[in-house]
Amino acid sequence: MKRNFDLLVFDWDGTLVDSAAHIVSSIQAACRDLDLPVPSDSIARYVIGLGLQDALEYVLPDLDTSRHAEVAERYRIHFLASNQGSVLFPQVGEGIARLEESGMLLAVATGKSRRGLDRSLQLTGLTGRFSASRCADEGFPKPHPDMLERLMYMLGVSPRRTLMIGDTTHDLNMASNAGTAAVAVTYGAHPRPALEELSPLACVESFAELMEWLDGNA
C-alpha cells in the first residue's frame, strides 16, 4: 500500500510517556518550596511541552525572570525524585518497534531538555528507536516550527510527507507553522475540544487507536 507519510514525529510527554500528572505535581511542588503562587492543575497542564521560559512566564507571570532558574531547579529535583515521568502508555513500546520495523522514519520533538530526553529514552527502553530528535534547549521551543523544520532537514523529508503526533495545542500549532499535517492524542495534557479546534487529521483516544489510524492512513 502506498504511504502518505515518510516521517512520523512524536511529542514525548503526554503522547508516548504518561508523565503529565507527574509534571503538574512537580511544578506545583516547586512553587510551594519557594512560597510562590501554586498554579491550578489546568494551568500547569497547559504549559506541558513549552520551553522553560515560556512555561514559567505563563505559570508565574509576576515572577522576575531572574528567579526562573531557581524555580526550574526545584522542579527538576521533584521530577527526578522518581521514575514516574518515564512510564510508557500502554502499547507504545510495541507500536514504536512495529513502526520502525516497517521502515517508517521516526523522530521526537519535545519540550524536554536534551539531558531529560536522553534519560527518559534510557528508562523507557526506547534509546535507538528514533532516527532523530530535537529538544527545547537546542533551538526555538514550541509552537515555533524550528524543531520540525530541523528534523525534516536532518532526515531529508518534505513537510508534505511529515506527520506530527502530539497531545497539546502547542504540538498542533507547531505543525501548522511548519506546514505539516498533525494527529492529536486526547489522553495527554490538553482537552479534546481545544485540540479539535485546530483541525488535526484525527483525534485518537489511545495509542492503540493511533496505531489503527496509522495503519489505515499513514
Image: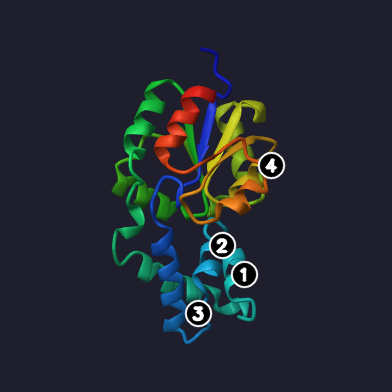
Looking at the image, residue 177 sits to the left or right of residue 136; the answer is right
Residue name at image x 37 percent, y 32 percent: 95
Compute the Cα span from label 3 to label 2: 14 Å
- At label 1, the amino acid type is Tyr
Q: State which tag comes first along the sequence, 3 or 1.
A: 3
- At label 4, the amino acid type is Ser
- At label 3, the amino acid type is Val
Q: Residues within 10 Å of mark 4 (few under 14, many from 20)?
A: some
Q: Which mark is residue 176?
A: 4
- The residue wearing badge 3 is 38
Q: Residues within 10 Å of mark 3 (few under 14, many from 20)?
A: some
Q: State which tag comes first along the sequence, 4 or 3.
A: 3
Q: Percent from the top left, x then y, of residue 10?
A: 49, 40
Q: Percent from the top left, x then y, of residue 39?
A: 52, 75
- The residue wearing badge 2 is 46
Q: Percent from the top left, x then y, of residue 193?
A: 61, 52
Is label 1 in a helix, a strand or a loop? helix
